[in-house]
Amino acid sequence: MSTAPPQQASASPMPPGVTDPNYRPEPGRLGNLTVTQQHTLEKFKKELQEEGWFVEERMDDATLLRSVLSRHVDLLIFLRARKFDLAKAKEMIINAEKWRKEFGVDEIVKNFDFKEKAEVDKYYPQYYHKCDKDGRPIYIERLGKLDIKALYSITTPERQLQRLVYEYEKFLTARLPSCSAAAGHPVETSCTILDLKDVSLTAFYRVKDYVFAASSIGQDRYPETMGKFYIINAPWAFSAVWGVIKPWLDEVTVKKINILGSGYKEELLKQIPEENLPKEFGGKCECPGGCSLSDAGPWNPETK
């Protein structure tokens, strides 16, 4: 089979680095833009440049095309929106740039050192680990392991948020490019596993402010990074609540989210290679020192 990149299929060129001959970009992504969308992208970039908001190293075409899901259930803004609303797109990106300065994102990227990582992992595991079958980095969070008293004896909510931002930045600048190179096509999203086994509502309530702040950062500052989302060991009550919420969400978001009980292994293995899934979730991976601290993946040459 030929390894030549697929032919241009739209008004926009195929993104660089594509070696997967079967890659076909989704509508609204580079390599699959209408003439109107391509012109709108160019206009958007030009306006950001003229108004002094354009940052070349962060605002490539793929980033500008990422849509932002607002807190309203079906309003898509940024350029991959249903109506390509430039005013709202510009407002969102300007607000994001202001937030970066206020939060000190550049300083965090350069100097943040989460020395307590190994200890925090015991009480609230959150980590990236290898890739799914589509090349996405896998992100795992074990909310049921949360021990809030122990957690906040060794770290603070502020440092947790700084770590979150540090990891988001690494996700964009290191994980996604490495995964894209390994897959031979653009990888722009993650595959998330949220484990709710033994979740304590009391513990969750005590950490809710952090969870809400973290969710807000993800939605508003790092949009459309969710590719697949598996919620496993979901209790009956959670499934019932999801049944009420689901009709209010847009179809694209709903398709990304899978609510699973304790019998989740088969569904996970449809998306994740067995050798990449940690053993505790039904896979075969047993990284030396534990998968949650290995940072194994294409972005980490030492783990290859």
Image (cartoon, helix red, strand yellow):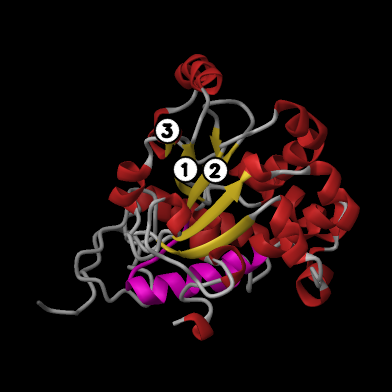
Give the CA separation, mark 1 to mark 3. Answer: 11 Å
Q: Disc 2 or 3, which lies upstream in sequence?
A: 2
Q: Is residue 264 magenta?
A: no
Mark 1 vs mark 3: in front: 3
The correct choice, above or below, for 230 with respect to 122 in the image is: above
* Residue type, mark 1 in image: Phe
Residue 229 circle label = 1
Residue 153 circle label = none
Q: Quadrant of the C terminus?
A: bottom left
- SS of the residue at dot 3? loop
34 lies left or right of 54: left
Q: Position of residue 148 (x, y in %)?
A: 81, 42
Q: Quadrant of the N terminus?
A: bottom left
Q: Disc 2 or 1, which lies upstream in sequence?
A: 2
Q: Which residue is depicted at the point 79% across and 68% down?
A: 114
- In this figure, what is the number of numbered marks? 3
Q: Position of residue 105 (x, y in %)?
A: 79, 64
Q: What is the crowding at mark 2: few (fewer than 14 residues within 10 Å), some, or many (at least 20)?
A: some
Q: Is residue 225 visible?
A: yes
Give the CA separation, mark 2 to mark 1. Answer: 8 Å
Residue 260 circle label = 3
Tell me whether the residue at label 1 lies in contact with that at label 3, contact meaning CB atoms closer than 8 angstroms.
no
| Residue identifier under label 2 | 194
Q: Which residues, given as a range, are shown in magenta?
A: 169-190
The correct choice, above or below, for 93 with respect to 195 in the image is: below
The secondary structure that most of the magenta stretch takes on is helix
* Residue type, mark 3 in image: Leu
Q: Is residue 49 visible?
A: no
* Residue type, mark 2 in image: Leu
Q: Disc 1 or 3, which lies upstream in sequence?
A: 1
288 lies left or right of 94: left
